[in-house]
Image (cartoon, rainbow, N blue to C red):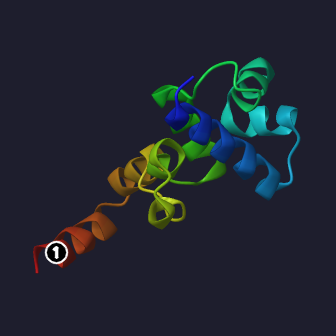
Amino acid sequence: MSRKDFERNNRVHQLRKELGLNQNEFALLTGMNFRSVSDIENHKCGVSKMQANRISNGARVGVEWILYGDESKKEYPVNDRLVKWLWEHEDIRAQLWKAIQD
């Protein structure tokens, strides 16, 4: 296992502890199975991009933080959930679009 994988796994473990959840509760929150969470935390496998996305969406943290450790992107993530919400709210999407054009 690479150092990057080891660090990713540690961030997943850290996040679960911050949320005050056991591995089963974390698995339910993120849509993963218990075995995957356990294997990640015990460094038996790395975190896949699909798993990072599930964790991001379920735990509301940035996938960039999970994968790369970018602390500035841990909170207020731009993830699938936000993108879906923006597609459903055209007025706010238009306001944001105008704001980034300036």
* Disc 1 crowd, CA 10 A, few/some/many (<14, 14-19, 20+): few
- Between 67 and 82, the one lying in front of the other is 67
| Identity, as a three-letter code, of the amino acid under mark 1 | Lys
Point out residue 38 in the picture as x, y percentages from the top left corner: 79, 25
The residue furthest bottom is 102
Query: Where residue 45 sits: x, y (%)?
Result: 63, 20
Of 44 and 94, the residue lying toward us: 44
- State whether residue 16 is above or below residue 27: below
Q: Residue at x 33, y 51 (%)?
A: 87
Residue at image position (52%, 28%) is 2
SS at mark 1 in the image: helix
- In the rendered image, the quadrant that contains the N terminus is top right
x then y, percent, for residue 3 = 54, 35
Q: Is residue 49 left or right of residue 23?
A: left
Q: Nearer the viewer, residue 51 or 14?
A: 14
Q: Check the image and report above or below for 3 versus 66.
A: above
**Is residue 28 left or right of 8 when viewed as pictured?**
right
Q: Residue 6's spot in the image, x, y percent?
A: 61, 34
Decide: is 102 above or below 36. below
Horizontally, residue 91 falls left or right of residue 88, namely left
- Quadrant in the picture for the C terminus: bottom left
| Circle 1 residue | 98
**In the figure, residue 44 lies in which quadrant?**
top right
Q: How many marks?
A: 1
What residue appears at the point 50 percent right and 37 percent down from the top-left corner? 4
